[in-house]
Image (tube, rainbow, N blue to C red):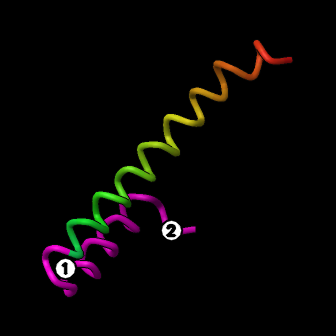
Amino acid sequence: MIPFPAQHEIFHAYIGRITPHSSRCIANMWHSAHFFHENSLSIMKTLVPWTL
């Protein structure tokens, strides 16, 4: 598994070759997915004890 910061750089280098509009949309999706993933882990840690 590539560490996230390295993946991030590779990703931006890759999308930089696509049209600016597309790369912006993809970058936003990427950031949203990462943000959601990070938060969903903390949300799960908070909620799971209450649901058991």
Q: Quadrant of residue 22?
A: bottom left
In the image as oriented, which residue stretches furthest toward the left? 20
SS at badge 2:
loop
Q: Which residue is mark 1?
A: 16
- Residue 2 is labelled as 2
- Residue 34 is labelled as none
Q: Which residues are magenta?
A: 1-21
Q: CA distance from mark 1 to mark 2?
A: 20 Å
Residue 19 lies, with reference to residue 4, above or below; the image says below
Q: Are marks 1 and 2 in contact (CB under 8 Å)?
A: no
Residue 14 lies, with reference to residue 34, above or below; the image says below
Residue at 66% x, 25% y is 45
What is the three-letter code of the residue carrying label 1? Gly
**Mark 1 or mark 2: which comes first in sequence?**
2
Residue at 26% x, 71% y is 12
Residue at 13% x, 76% y is 20
Q: Is residue 12 left or right of residue 47?
A: left
Task: Indicate whether residue 13 is drawn in magenta.
Answer: yes
- Along the line of sight, which residue is nearer the eye, 10 or 51? 51
What is the three-letter code of the residue carrying label 2? Ile
Classed neighbour count for the residue bearing mark 1: other residues with Cα under 10 Å, few (<14), some (14–19), many (≥20)? some
